[in-house]
Amino acid sequence: MKKRFGKKGILLSLFAGLWVMVCAFYTPDTTPVTPYKLKTVVIDAGHGGHDHGCSGASNNEKTLSLKMSLKLGELIEKNYPDVKVIYTRKTDVFIELYERAAIANRNNADLFICIHCNANPSTSPSGTETYVMGLHKTEANLNVAKRENDVILLESDYKQNYDGFNPNDPASHIIFSLNQHAFMEQSILFASSVEKYLKSHAKRSSRGVKQAGFLVLWKTAMPSVLIETGFLTNPSEEKFLGSEDGQTAIAESIFYAFRDYKNDMENTSGVISEEKAKELNAEVDKAPTASTTTTPTVEKSSTDQQKGLTFSVQFYSAQSEVAASKFAKLQPENITYVQENGWYKYRLGPYSSLDEATKKQTLARTNGYKDAFVIAMKDGKRISIDEARALTATK
């Protein structure tokens, strides 16, 4: 009798038997993937109580940030009743920075939005900027973070609450800024949308998405941003932010950004592609190149805007007005000019300290203005540097 199976046939039979057994015991995982849903947003109105924040001629930051925060929350609640809106404060009370982050963490928030107003020693700077947690890429970013972080000096036990962080120690800011936020890409995505709508809807000048080490963003366990809605030290922007229409326009702009962000996250299950992440990160603190260098704004100086003691750097003089494009190397510095005895005198500033003005003098000289020098003004009148030092020493 002939053999029915050879070695090959036996192996095939064994394999088939094993496959039948595997199929009999294997149950495919049909558990549906739970889609990502943005369920909770925390809105943080900057400052409050005895912490007034920065101030303009007739408005302060704590009041305006609260008004805009409440308007934003109302828009989200009205249009997305399934989203839980939590406020760190709804009244004029002081909340520690660490507690603001803790409120978001305790409630498992999906997004943390801080609303603030900006300030500068000069009345010239204007525009919005939205920050994410990250490295201080410029001195200007660091200065904004320092101003907002100084609030902790009003708290008791601030060294314990912030792991020994000292806002008066420059080294602390450098070390602290190395902490990278785990939700960087999502934060940048939302921040970019905020700046887009502040420019297109609220008709604000956008200074872009920036990185800096803000204590209020430090310990948040979710995407988070800090929005500087404009400069209260700029008379035009203060008027806008102090108006009902201006506050509504800002709140609506942030709401539109929230709407887009919610849609993006829910349609991608909360995941941002590697390509999109690279694109977003390329837009943060994007440095101007030779082909995109912007012309600095040159404004006529108004002595009634320079109250108190200020310092400027005079770097150029001419007997006729000079086109702003001549000073392109100094962008984006604040440049003003005065007319004296038939001469146009161009200056950087004003600045609030002699130290800052001296640094700008070095900047001007480095860019070719070798004769740049520092001048001091007291209530709009020029005084000597020695007199300015004496006034500073008596403060």
Image (cartoon, helix red, strand yellow):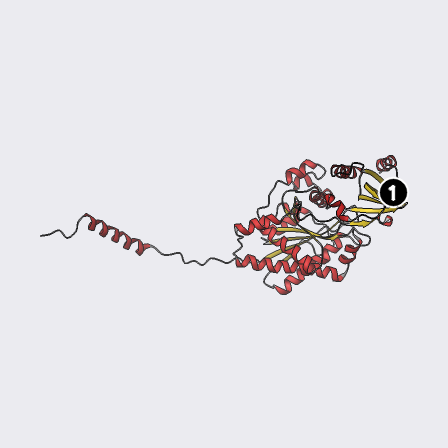
Can the viewer see residue 293 in this picture? yes
Q: Where is residue 214 in the image (x, y as percent from the top left)?
A: 66, 45
Amino acid on which disc 1 is placed: Lys
User: Which residue is label 1 attached to?
Assistant: 378
Q: Where is residue 309 in the image (x, y as percent from the top left)?
A: 85, 42
The residue drawn where x is 71% and y is 61% is 249
- The crowd level at tag 1 (other Cα within 10 Å; few <14, some 14-19, many 20+) is some
The residue drawn where x is 34% and y is 55% is 26
Pick whichever, 393 or 389, lies toward us: 389
Res. 375 image quadrant? top right
Res. 254 image quadrant? bottom right
Pick whichever, 213 or 197, lies toward us: 197
The residue drawn where x is 83% and y is 47% is 337
| Left or right: 278, with 362 as reference point | left
Q: Position of residue 388 (x, y in %)?
A: 86, 37
The C terminus lies in which quarter of the figure?
A: top right
Q: Where is residue 43 in the image (x, y as percent from the top left)?
A: 66, 55
Task: Find the residue positioned furthest to the left.
Answer: 1
